[in-house]
Image: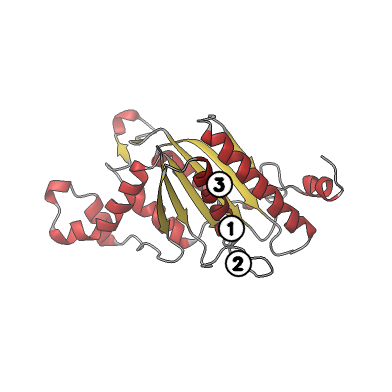
Amino acid sequence: MKKVLIVEASARAQGLVEGRSGSLSRFLSDRFSSRWRHLNNEDIFIYRDVGAMPPQFMSHKWIAAAFTSEESRSAEQRALLCLSDQLIAEVAQADLILIATPMYNYGMPASLKAWFDQVIRVNKTFSFDLARGDFPLQPLLSGKTLVLLTSSGEFGFEPGGLRESMNHLGPHVRTLSHYLGVEEFHEIGIEYQEFGDDRHRASIDLARQAVDELVEQLSRGPVHLHADVFFTPGEASAALAGKP
C-alpha cells in the first residue's frame, strides 16, 4: 500500500469540463488520480489544494523560528511553524507526490512557491553542513517519485524548444524536488491553451494518453526515469495528419 500526496495549485477551482473552460492541470490531476485508484484501490490519498488555500508566505519571524532550535522555540514560534510541520509530515509519508499546476508568467504560481518554502526547511527536509564544502545542503528524505502535471498558454518549453529558456516552471520544480527526497521525476504538460486550435486539442489528447501510460508504468513499480512529455509542433502536425 502506497501513500499519494496530491498538490494542486491552479487558481481555477474546477477541472476541464466538456464545452466549458476550466483548469487543465486539475483535469490531468483528476485523470491521474482516477486511473491510479482504479489500479491501486488500497492506496491512501492525501490532498493539498494550495490554489484554493494558499500557504502563508515566509516572514522575518517565520525565518527566525525555523532557525531556532526546537527546544528553544517560544510558543509563538511553534505556532508560526505549525502549518510547515503539517505540510512536511504530508510529504514525509508520501511515496508518490503529484503536483498539478499551471504555468503563470513562465513560472509556478505564488501559492505553489509558498508551499515549497514551507516544506523545504533546514533540519526537517534538508541538513546543512559546511564540512561538505561547496555543496553543504543534503536532503533528509529519499525514495520518492514526483509527477508534475502542467498546463501552459504557449508552447515549445521542452528541452530544445523555441521557448526552452523561458520555462521557469518544470526546471524549478525539478531542482526543488531534490530536497523533498525525490529520486524519480516525470513531467507531462498540455500546451497551446491560448491558441485554442487543433494543436491544443491534440495536446490535451496526448497528455491524457501519457497520464494513463504513466499510471500503468508506475503501478508496476519504479522505472528510474526522468521523463518529460510535451506536445511539440512536429508531433502536432504528425498527429493531425494521422501519422504515428
**Mark 1 or 3, closer to the camera:** 3
| Mark found first going from the N terminus, 2 or 3 | 2
For the residues labelled 2 and 3, the Cα–Cα distance comes to 20 Å
What amino acid is labelled 1 in the image? Phe
Residues 63 and 198: in front is 198
What SS does tag 3 mark? helix
What residue did someone put label 2 on? 22
Which residue appears at 29% of the width and 53% of the height? 86
The percent coordinates of residue 88 (x first, y second) are 32, 48
Kindly check if marks 2 and 1 are in contact, taking CB atoms under 8 A apart as contact. Answer: yes
| Mark found first going from the N terminus, 1 or 3 | 1
Labelled disc at residue 27:
1
| Mark found first going from the N terminus, 2 or 1 | 2
Kindly check if marks 1 and 3 are in contact, taking CB atoms under 8 A apart as contact. Answer: no
Residues 60 and 238: in front is 238
Q: Residues within 10 Å of mark 2 (few under 14, many from 20)?
A: some
What residue did someone put label 3 on? 35
Q: Is residue 178 visible?
A: yes
